[in-house]
């Protein structure tokens, strides 16, 4: 008798415990930093297994012109409002320059015209937002690997950090400025391009004019818009929130392959 | 008058014997599944809320046609929640589209009580979802390995010719509808409806769930583009993920109802301790 009762009690106790977690303590548990730390281990597992299972050079599917989305949904910042950016956008970005610096042998400054003279890649690819939607567009731009090769990476270089012109969150300390980072596997992927054109037209402001990153095997927030500077670094934990990007500092995964 | 020794015991029903019904692996993986599927569903609804529309095909965003949508609109001072399947729109205020958060009617697809966390937080929802997706997959692989090597699939799940004979299936459907469940020797084994349902869930629905989930990964699509062909595109895969998720919920509801109707404590004991009581048939 006591055995059955104790089992019953155990079952009732477990059910009540689960119910308590489900009803009252759920948000405390869900947002608890220790719990978050344990849950975040799955990101390393995801990145490790995707890197193992997907070859470094595997290309994202490229679509036909007929499969392009009728309209490409703009997201995140769509109109940066810093005086410098507004001035540049009003003058067709003639005095905009892309800086490439950090751990490179040959720092560079390139105008939009310089970039357009370099060899380009055109790809019709799918953009996947972390929210769940997708849009297909035709991008044209300079392969990032080509630029990094001519700049020459110093030994120990591990990441490309993209500094952007848009401030997605207004803060006093500037930590709301958009930035992103990718590692060299993605930086040298053939489809990683600095795009200046969408669907055959110069990139519009809402899509990141004059230049945005395309890193096709990642979710949309990795595709930094309004590029100003590419900094080659060996770490990013000393930048802003330390997680390697604007959304990463706000809880999203650095590895955005899923 | 009979002496006190002759009173005997009260007449009892058929003698009960206790059998080992579920192995330790089955019991452990079952309860880990309960945990995983619950948290996956709740965090999945959190993720869905970030874009509460489903599209068909390779692409689909807020400007594009959707075949399913949970939305809200303002009506004077109040908020109306709606759910649309194809061209059929239903008012679902209170549950879907608009529901109370701290007493206040708020615009959100799935209600706060159903999502992890309760407030809108896609990043945290994703974290929970992927952690428990991994646990679920590892747990499932252990179960499948055990099922193949330990003979659980062959012994307990593979339907016999007698099981799938139309006459037997029809008889079992009628028995289930009348809530007459197998007794005695017959209760030692899964019946045909159980076997077929478990096979459908284990080898069709759960693989579809994992496959459609992976198809939403841009990195997996690059490595394994056939995923896009199997599911008809990333947005179709998202829709299939959603449909199969609710098919699993339907399975769980029926499963739990059956557990309750066919002897709740006996079933629960067999899934916790492994021991299941059956009544011994009295032989004439």
Image (cartoon, grey):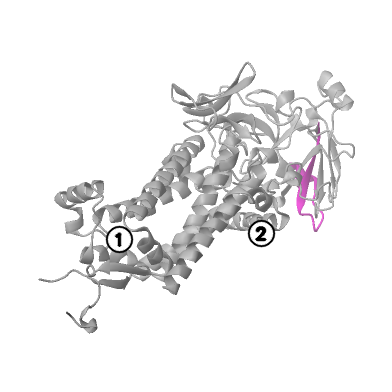
Query: Residue lying farthest top?
Result: B76
Q: Which residue is mark 2?
A: A38
Q: Splitting the image into 4 quarters, where does residue A126 fall? A: top right
Bounds of the magenta span? A147-166
Does B213 appear above or below B90?
Answer: below
Left or right side of A165 for A72? left
Residue B96 magenta = no
Quadrant occupied by the N terminus of chain A: bottom left
Per the model, the C-alpha gap separating discs 1 and 2 is 36 Å
Q: Which residue is mark 1?
A: B157
User: Does the image show residue A144?
Assistant: yes
Residue B60, position as x, y percentages in the image: 54, 29
Q: Chain of mark 1?
A: B
Residue A102, position as x, y percentages in the image: 85, 48
Q: Chain of mark 2?
A: A
Left or right side of A163 for B101? left
Does A32 appear above or below A165?
Answer: below
């Amino acid at each position: 008798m006591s055995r059955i009762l104790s089992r019953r009690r155990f079952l009732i106790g477990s059910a009540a415990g689960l119910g308590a977690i489900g009803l009252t303590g759920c948000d405390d548990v869900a947002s608890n930093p220790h719990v978050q730390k344990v849950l975040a281990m799955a990101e390393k597992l995801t990145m490790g297994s995707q890197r193992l299972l997907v070859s470094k050079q595997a290309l994202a599917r490229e679509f036909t012109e007929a499969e392009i989305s009728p309209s490409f949904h703009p997201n995140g910042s769509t109109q940066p409002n810093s005086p410098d950016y507004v001035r540049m956008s009003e003058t067709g970005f003639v005095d905009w320059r892309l800086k490439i610096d950090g751990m490179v042998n040959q720092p560079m400054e390139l105008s939009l015209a310089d970039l357009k003279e370099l060899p380009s890649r055109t790809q019709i690819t799918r953009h996947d937002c972390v929210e769940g939607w997708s849009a297909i567009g035709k991008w044209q731009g300079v392969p990032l690997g080509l630029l990094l090769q001519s700049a020459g990476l110093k030994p120990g270089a591990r990441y490309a950090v993209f500094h952007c012109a848009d401030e997605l969150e207004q803060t006093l300390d500037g930590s709301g400025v958009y930035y992103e980072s990718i590692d060299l596997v993605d930086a040298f992927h053939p489809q990683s391009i600095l795009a200046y054109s969408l669907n055959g037209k110069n990139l519009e402001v809402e899509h990141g004019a004059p230049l945005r990153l395309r890193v096709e095997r990642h979710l949309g927030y990795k595709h930094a818009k309004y590029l100003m500077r590419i900094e080659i670094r060996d770490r990013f934990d000393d930048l802003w929130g330390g997680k390697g990007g604007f959304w990463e500092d706000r809880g999203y995964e650095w590895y955005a392959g899923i | 008058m009979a002496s006190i020794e002759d009173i005997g015991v009260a007449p009892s029903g058929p003698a009960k014997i206790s059998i080992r019904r579920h192995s330790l692996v089955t019991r452990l993986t079952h309860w880990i599944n309960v945990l995983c599927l619950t948290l996956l569903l709740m965090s999945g609804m959190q993720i869905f809320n970030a874009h509460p529309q489903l599209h068909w095909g390779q692409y689909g965003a807020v400007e594009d046609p959707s075949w399913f949508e949970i939305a809200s609109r303002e009506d004077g001072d109040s908020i109306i929640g709606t759910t649309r399947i194809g061209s059929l729109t239903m008012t679902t205020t209170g549950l879907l589209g608009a529901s109370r958060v701290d007493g206040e009617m708020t615009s959100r697809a799935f209600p706060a009580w159903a999502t992890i966390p309760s407030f809108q937080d896609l990043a945290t929802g994703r974290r929970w979802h992927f952690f428990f997706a991994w646990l679920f997959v590892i747990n499932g692989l252990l179960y499948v390995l055990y099922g193949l090597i330990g003979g659980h699939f062959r012994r307990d799940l593979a339907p016999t010719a007698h099981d799938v004979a139309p006459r037997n299936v029809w008889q079992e459907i009628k028995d289930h509808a009348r809530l007459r469940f197998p007794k005695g020797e017959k209760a030692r084994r899964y019946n045909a409806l159980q076997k077929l349902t478990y096979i459908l869930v284990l080898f069709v629905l759960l693989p579809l769930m994992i496959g459609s989930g992976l198809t939403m990964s841009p990195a997996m699509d690059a490595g394994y583009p056939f995923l896009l062909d199997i599911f008809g595109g990333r947005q179709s895969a998202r829709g299939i993920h959603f449909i199969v998720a609710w098919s699993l919920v339907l399975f769980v509801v029926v499963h739990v109802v059956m557990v309750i109707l066919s002897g709740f404590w006996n079933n629960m004991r067999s899934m916790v301790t492994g021991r299941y009581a059956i009544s011994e048939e009295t032989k004439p």
